[in-house]
Image (cartoon, grey):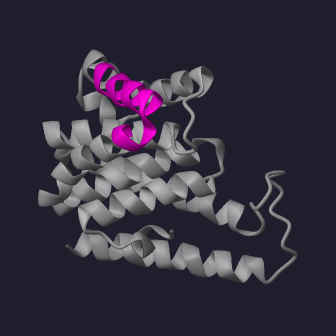
Amino acid sequence: MAMWDRIKDQAKGLQQQAQGARGGSGAGGHGRPGAGGSGGSKAQLVSALKTQLTSLKTELKSGAYRDASMAMCALVAAADGNVDPAERQHVESLILNNDVLQNFPSEQLRTRFNKHVDQLAFNFQQGKAEALQEIAKAAKKPTEARAVVQTGFVVAGADGYVAPAEEQVLREACSVLGLSSQEFGI
């Protein structure tokens, strides 16, 4: 667990930097509404989480992690209740090019991701409930549970911004996994 203590310390440090940045000029420079001074800190957090996730690549080879991660990615892609075809394709590309997810055959990832996206597009609330059930299966292994949230965060923050709807589904995933969302700065 010492590694997770270091991760928490890094996340707390990034949060403190973000709070300090908000006290400054407040100009995030991201051009997105609501990004404010926290935009840069979220990008830093996403970068730190991506690095930490990559360091766990050899441990993240289970089917539970694969399936929960694909459900998480689908939830992030559809977080606002819509599944835009361009966004779907973009997230699928992120998944297939993710260093850690390359532990799995791309067709397995694509099939599982698209199954969840299709369910979310057909009936968002039911699809969301099913995705969260899939995510909850990773709760048995704390390393995998955290990695699922980290994967979602990396996908959500790929554009340098984590939208409020994306933060909400990440918080919900933390809840079903028995993790504190504060650990991830959300």
In the displayed structure image, the side of residue 163 where residue 94 appears, left or right: left
Question: Is residue 94 depicted above or below 161 in this figure?
Answer: above
Q: Residue at x 36, y 37 (%)?
A: 127
Question: Is residue 14 depicted above or below 56 in this figure?
Answer: below
Q: How many marks?
A: 0
Q: Residue at x 24, y 31 (%)?
A: 103
Q: Position of residue 13 (x, y in %)?
A: 53, 78
Q: Position of residue 53 (x, y in %)?
A: 35, 51
Q: Residue at x 74, y 77 (%)?
A: 21
In the displayed structure image, the side of residue 141 where residue 83 appears, left or right: right
Residue 94 visible from this viewpoint: yes
In the picture as drawn, the residue positioned furthest to the top comes out as 107
**What is the quadrant of residue 171 in the picture?**
bottom left
**What is the quadrant of residue 52 in the picture?**
bottom left
Dominant secondary structure of the residues highlighted in magenta in the image: helix
Residue 62 visible from this viewpoint: no
In the displayed structure image, the side of residue 139 where residue 69 appears, left or right: right
Is 123 one of the magenta-colored residues? yes
Q: Quadrant of the N terminus?
A: bottom left
Question: Is residue 27 depicted above or below 125 in this figure?
Answer: below
Is 86 one of the magenta-colored residues? no
Q: Which residues are magenta?
A: 111-127
Q: Position of residue 12 (x, y in %)?
A: 49, 79
Q: Position of residue 50 (x, y in %)?
A: 44, 50
Residues 43 and 174: in front is 174
Residues 175 and 93: in front is 175
